[in-house]
Amino acid sequence: MTDFKIAPSILSANFACLGEEVDRVIASGADIVHFDVMDNHYVPNLTIGPMVCKALRQHGVTAPIDVHLMVKPVDRMIAEFIEAGATYITFHPEASEHIDRSLQMIKDGGCQAGLVFNPATPLHLMDHVMDKLDMVLLMSVNPGFGGQAFIPHTLEKLKQARAKLDASGFDIRLEVDGGIKTSNIAQVAQAGADTFVAGSAIFNAFNTGDPNGYDSVIAEM
Ligand code: DX5
Ligand code: ZN
């Protein structure tokens, strides 16, 4: 039986009360806090950094924090997020000059390491570092913004990634990120994902005044 996990992306949360937003999604049954770091260089958007991760820990968040680095270069941010209390740190292989070294930095810092694949980034970039991976994150949108539509051809890629991870014999989570809703999550799970990032689907349910709030969205997922 697969151990499915829901990871709300706080990119769609209300930043004016982020601690409370995170407390609420965790109390509603979410497993992991997905933390999107954008640098206005690797992606055309600017979000939050290690100080905010540290502040969430100081606020009392004990859930795993899954730091998705959309930054270039990556290594300095790895060091800072280790210090700030990250649980998982994932980065895009094309943003690192030395993929093996960046992964090893994450492991040496006591965090779980992962690589992120954009819809058009080839999966073979993981081939020589699978022993260092705790997670593979497959983007089902092009990174940079919340609220984009799921790209259908990424379902086939998810299946290929699932086969690769199974064949490796390593225990590696397969996370999917972008456009995940209650309407497509079953199909995405069937293609092989076990960890589901959802930003707008979860937080908009609450912040637009949906009377059911996001606890019902998380429960349905
Ligand atoms: C996009 C980010 C995602 C984003 C997902 O670059 O990596 O984590 O917040 O948002 P939704 O679920 O709204 O597509
Ligand atoms: Zn993300």
Image (spheres, grey):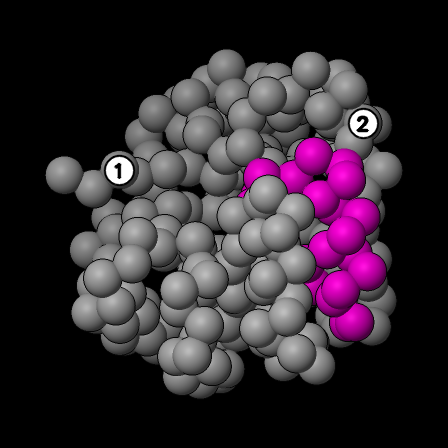
Residue at numbered disc 2: 55
Q: Is residue 125 above or below residue 151?
A: below
- Whether residue 213 is visible to the viewer of this picture, yes or no, is no
| Image-based side of 25 in relation to 122, left or right | right
Count neighbours of disc 2 (C-alpha within 10 A) and say few if under 14, some if 14 to 19, many if 20 or more. some
- Image quarter (top left, top right, bottom left or bottom right) of the N terminus: top left
For residue 105, what is the image quadrant? bottom right
Question: Residue 12 sits in which quadrant?
Answer: top right
Position of 63 with respect to 38 (left or right) is: left
Q: Earlier in the sequence, mark 2 or mark 1?
A: 1
Q: Is mark 2 within 8 Å of ligand 1?
A: no
Number of residue marks: 2
Which stretch appears magenta?
A: 66-88
Judging depth in this view, the residue of 215 and 60 nearest the camera is 60
**Image vertical order of residue 42 relative to residue 131, above or below:** below
Q: Residue at x 57, y 53 (%)?
A: 107
For disc 1, the marked residue is: 3
* Residue 75 seen in the current view: yes
Element assignment for label 1: loop
